[in-house]
Amino acid sequence: MASLPLRAKIPPLTNYTVLIAFVALIVFFSISAEGFLSLQNFINLTVNKVVLLAIIALGMTIVIASGGIDLSVGVSVDMSSMVFIMLLAAGFSGVLGIAGGLSAALCVGLLNAALINRLNINPFLATLGILFIGQSTQQLASRGGQPIYLTRAEFAPTFEAISRTDLLGIPTPVVVLMACAFAVYLALHHGAFGRYVRALGAQPGVAWYSGVRVPVQLSIVYVASAFLSGIAGILLSATVKSYVPLSGNAYLLDAIGATFIGTALSTDRRPSVLGTLLGVFLLAVTRNGLLLIGWNFFWQQVGIGVLVFLVLALSFGLNRRRE
C-alpha cells in the first residue's frame, strides 16, 4: 500500500496557533489577574472592547480578502459618529440621526471606490488619502477638534435604545455584532460575492478575464467596509453620548492585526470571519488581562505587538517548515 505524502502525515498544527495562544492567555490571566474570570469582567470585555473592534474588523476582513487594504475605517467611524451626534444636537430624531450617520460612512466608501476604480489609484494610497482628508474635515467641522457632548434629557431614549437595552438578556451592541458577523459570513463564505472577492485576492487578472465585474465587486467591498465602520461609529456615540474627533483611528491597527491573526486559522492563509473574531478576542483578552495585572497603556501596546509578532511568526514559520 502506497504511503501517504509527508504533508498528509504531519498534523496541521499551524491552523491552531491562534486558538492555542488564546487558551494559553486565558489560563495565564486566570492565574495572574484577579477578577479576570468574573462574569462582570467578561461582559465588560465583550461590550466595551470586542464589539466595536469586531464590527470594524469584519469590514477589514472583506477588504483584505479582496487583496486590498482600507486605512480609512477610522474616518468612516468618525464621520458616522459626527453626523449622528450633530443631527441629534440639531433636534432630529434618533432614526434620522442613525440614517444620516450611516450615509456619511457610505460616502467614505463610495469615495474610496471611485478613487480605486475610476482613477486606478492603489488601495493603500487611496484610503490613506481619504484618511488625511477625513481627519482635516473633522477638525474643521468640530472647530479644531473639539468634542461634541450631548446632555439633554430628550436624547436619553435614543442612547438607551442603542446601548442599554437587551434582547433575551443579550446587550443590543452584542446583538448588532452577531447580526453583522452572520451577514458577512454568509456573503463571504456562502455566496457568489465571496467567490468573487477571493478570486480578486488570489488572482485579480484571472478574475477579470473570467468575467468578474471587478469595478462593481471592489465598490461593494469598500462600501461594505465603510458601512460596517459606520455602524461601529453609531454604537460608539451612543455609548459615550458624544462625538470625539479622530477617535476612530484607535481601531485601525487593531482591526488590521486581528484580521491577519485570523488568517492563521485557514490552510490557505486567507481572511475569514471566524478567524477575525478569534483575533479580536485574542487582542481584547490581552489588553484586559494586562490592564488587570497593572500594566499601563504603553506597555500594553508593547505586549500586543509582541503577541501579534509571535503568533504570526510561529504560524507562518511552522507552515513553511511543514510544506
Image (cartoon, grey):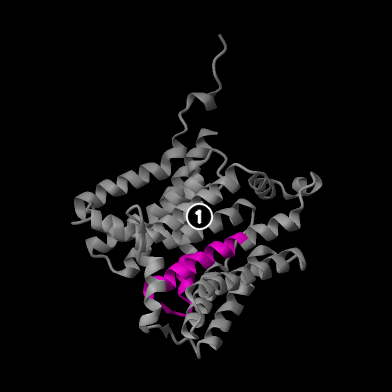
- In the visual, does 231 lie left or right of 172? right
Q: Mark 1 sits on what residue?
A: 180
Q: Nearer the viewer, residue 51 or 94?
A: 94
Please tell me which residue is depicted at 45% across the width and 58% down the height of the picture.
176
Residue extending farthest left: 34
At which x and y percent is residue 32?
A: 20, 53
Please tell me which residue is depicted at 64% across the width and 52% down the height of the picture.
66
User: What amino acid is labelled 1 in the image?
Assistant: Cys
Please tell me whether residue 150 is drawn above or below residue 64 in the rendered image: below
In this orientation, does residue 303 appear?
A: no
In reply to whether residue 12 is colored magenta, the answer given is no
Element under disc 1: helix
- In the visual, does 128 lie left or right of 158? right
Please tell me whether residue 280 is drawn above or below residue 210 in the rendered image: below
In this orientation, does residue 239 appear?
A: yes
- In the visual, does 310 lie left or right of 210? left
Q: Nearer the viewer, residue 2 or 98?
A: 98
Please tell me which residue is depicted at 68% across the width and 70% down the height of the picture.
111
Span shown in magenta: 224-252
- Quarter of the image with the C terminus in it: top right
